[in-house]
């Protein structure tokens, strides 16, 4: 793959981290490296078309497409790069596909590197997608690694969208904005996993409109704030019809970290059933002691607890 896509070992490592890619993926893919296309492939059922000006792609998934995947990872290894990319997904009726995105930045320079990916999903009736988005940063430079994803989801009747949003390491600053509009019978599941350390900052905002009868949403975030980092989780579910919604934020705070949880519910229909939960706390001492009796150091015990919590 390195020869085929002209990538070096650092770029390959980033691809493995954010998209679990060890070789050229089967099926459709669009791999972006340092603001340029490194490789692209369409299939009979999934067509990838670059937007004019090179600032994004349109992905068209034919109705009824099953058991196919689309990989659209981004890697950046040059310091000082800043880009905004617009990717639109048009998912046909009755399709059932996996979409793997993600961005990895390795910054060894003094300038900030930033990737802002704006993704819009137009999900047809009865269609189902699983969307995996992983963010990762590395590099020894003083320049920041900045990622600001924007996600818009438009779901037609009885469609299902499952989103896995993961950021575990190395991203200095991120503001992620997600909005969703659900028609009757549509279902949205979000699982966010997040860890910040150093002086990192992470803001997550969700606004979900349940517009049709029987629409459901379940937005759950698990996070750990270490060192002097700051996190804000702001999730609002709006029930505009007989529907059900749940949002939950479960966080571990360590060192001098700060966490702000702002769960919000808005019911505009008498049959909107909405629930929110939020919990922030430190690792319980008895958990650490229990693991230390099994031979772990205090630091190893902490890591075990965090890893289990973020799985």
Image (tube, grey):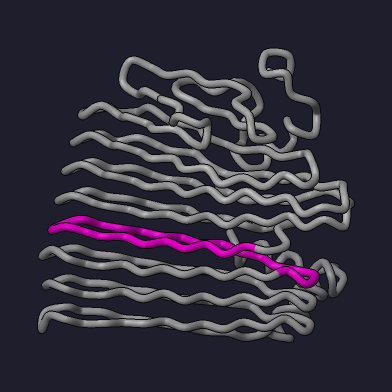
Answer left or right for 103 relative to 43.
right
Q: Give the residue at x 16% y 73%.
A: 240
Front residue of 82 and 208: 82
| Region in magenta | 174-200
Toward which corner of the image does residue 75 lie, by quadrant?
top right
Q: Position of residue 283 (x, y in %)?
A: 69, 81
Q: Position of residue 307 (x, y in %)?
A: 67, 62
Front residue of 287 and 222: 222
Q: Position of residue 198 (x, y in %)?
A: 80, 70
Toward which corner of the image does residue 227 lie, by quadrant?
bottom right
Count of picture labels: 0
Front residue of 111 and 133: 111
Residue 305 visible? The answer is: no
Q: Is residue 12 above or below residue 259?
A: above
| Farthest residue, direction front | 53
Toward which corner of the image does residue 185 lie, by quadrant?
bottom left
Answer left or right for 10 relative to 245.
right
On-image quarter of the N terminus: top right
Q: Is residue 247 above or below residue 52?
A: below
Q: Position of residue 225 (x, y in %)?
A: 68, 74
The secondary structure that dominates the magenta segment is strand
Residue 83 visible? The answer is: yes
Q: Give the residue at x 82% y 74%.
A: 292
Q: Give the residue at x 87% y 70%.
A: 297
Magenta run includes residue 195: yes
Magenta run includes residue 278: no
Answer left or right for 293 relative to 266.
right
On-image quarter of the C terminus: bottom right
Answer left or right for 201 relative to 111.
left
Q: Give the residue at x 23% y 41%.
A: 127
Front residue of 235 and 86: 86
């Amino acid at each position: 793959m390195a020869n085929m896509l002209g990538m070096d070992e650092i770029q390959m490592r980033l691809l493995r981290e954010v998209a679990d890619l060890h070789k050229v993926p089967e099926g459709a893919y669009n791999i972006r490296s340092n603001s340029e296309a490194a490789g692209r492939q369409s299939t009979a059922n999934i067509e990838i078309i670059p937007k004019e000006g090179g600032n994004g792609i349109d992905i068209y998934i034919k109705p009824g497409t099953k058991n196919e995947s689309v990989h659209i990872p981004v890697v950046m290894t040059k310091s000082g790069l800043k880009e905004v990319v617009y990717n639109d997904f048009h998912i046909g009726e009755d399709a059932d596909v996996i979409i793997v995105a993600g961005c990895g930045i390795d910054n060894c320079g003094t300038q900030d590197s930033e990737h802002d990916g704006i993704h819009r999903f137009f999900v047809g009736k009865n269609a189902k997608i699983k969307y995996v988005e992983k963010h990762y940063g590395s590099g020894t430079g003083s320049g920041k690694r900045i990622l600001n994803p924007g996600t818009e989801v438009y779901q037609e009747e009885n469609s299902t969208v499952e989103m896995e949003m993961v950021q575990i390491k190395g991203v200095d600053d991120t503001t992620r904005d997600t909005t969703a509009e659900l028609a009757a019978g549509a279902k949205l599941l979000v699982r966010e996993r997040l860890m910040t350390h150093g002086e990192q900052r992470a803001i997550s905002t969700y606004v979900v409109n349940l517009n049709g009868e029987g629409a459901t949403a379940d937005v759950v975030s698990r996070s750990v704030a270490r060192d002097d980092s700051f996190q804000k989780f702001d999730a609002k579910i709006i029930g505009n019809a007989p529907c059900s919604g749940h949002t939950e934020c479960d966080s571990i705070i360590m060192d001098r970290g700060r966490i702000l949880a702002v769960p919000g519910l808005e019911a505009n229909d008498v049959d909107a059933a909405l629930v929110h939960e939020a919990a922030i706390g430190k690792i319980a001492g008895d958990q650490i002691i229990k693991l230390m009796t099994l031979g772990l150091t205090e630091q190893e015990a902490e890591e075990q607890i965090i890893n289990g919590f973020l799985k």
